[in-house]
Amino acid sequence: MIDTADSMCVDEIRSSANFGPRRPGVRPEILLLHYTGMKSAARAIDWLCRPESRVSSHYVIDEHGRVTQLVAEVERAWHAGVAIWHGETDINSLSIGIEIHNPGHDDGYPDFPDAQMGRLEALCRDIVQRWQIAPERVLAHSDVAPRRKIDPGEKFDWARLHAAGVGHWIDPAPLDCRDEGFQPGAAAQEVIEAQQQLARFGYGVPLTGVLDEETVIVLTAFQRHFRPARCDGRLDRSTLDTLQRLTKSLQPAV
């Protein structure tokens, strides 16, 4: 149960039954963003609070920007599921989860409203400052679970969030529509280089040198976050250039 909100951005507290202690000695170092994928924020909040759902998040932001806290930040909410980042699989222990209301790809996938994005920026800034979460650890659900998840999706404005002081971003290389890139099954030096760069950033990807199914899935997740103009899992020049510049821009300590 939550007695006091963790952030001044919170408008309402609705305690979820679905949480537990974080792994001993672990503190939040990832901020994980989702979309609700439900008809309404009210339905999402209700479901995330029900014991039988076995899911939760720390926060929900509705389309008007209203922020509801469901789980205390010190607790482990159940939002990431089967996931991996930098080899770590207990992402729930490592993260704070925010559900952004959007009905999702199966129900029209509307744009994220300005009021919603503005409140999200404020909440994210507060969280990353209090917990000292590194910019490159502000991630999409699809980044840590690319085989299962596609949220918050290619319409989510990561560049805007970065301009507000949250997250790691570089402008993606321009897309050449004539460049079809390496096709699935291709074996090339560029493929192993891309796999190495993806792994360095944190993605769970095999280092096979072949554009296999798993690599295509991970590349698609990377594109959805950092090169959303085309999310097809092909290794084209735009994707490789964006990936190389992104990892090069990381601080040496990462």
Image: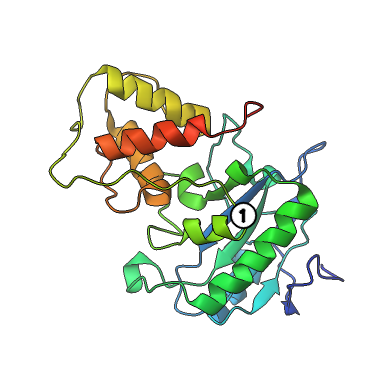
Q: How is the image coloured?
A: rainbow
Q: Nearer the viewer, residue 55 or 190?
A: 190
The residue depicted at 77 percent of the width and 57 percent of the height is: 73
Q: Nearer the viewer, residue 1 or 187?
A: 187
Q: Name above or below for residue 80 compared with residue 239.
A: below
Q: Which residue is mark 1?
A: 166
Residue 50 appears in the figure: no
- Label 1: element kind: loop
Q: What amino acid is found at the position of numbered circle 1 in the picture? A: Val
Relative to 39, is 202 on the left or the right?
right
The residue depicted at 53 percent of the width and 43 percent of the height is: 82
Image quadrant assignment for residue 115 = bottom right
Q: Name above or below for residue 201 compared with residue 1.
A: above
Number of dots carrying numbers:
1
The residue depicted at 61 percent of the width and 76 percent of the height is: 46
Q: Position of residue 13 (x, y in %)?
A: 75, 76
Q: Position of residue 87 (x, y in %)?
A: 57, 29
Image quadrant assignment for residue 37 = bottom left
Relative to 163, is 199 on the left or the right?
left
Image quarter (top left, top right, bottom left or bottom right) of the C terminus:
top right
Image quarter (top left, top right, bottom left or bottom right) of the N terminus:
bottom right
Q: Nearer the viewer, residue 133 or 18?
A: 133
Q: Position of residue 148 (x, y in %)?
A: 41, 48
Q: Position of residue 28 (x, y in %)?
A: 73, 46
Relative to 64, is 67 on the left or the right?
right
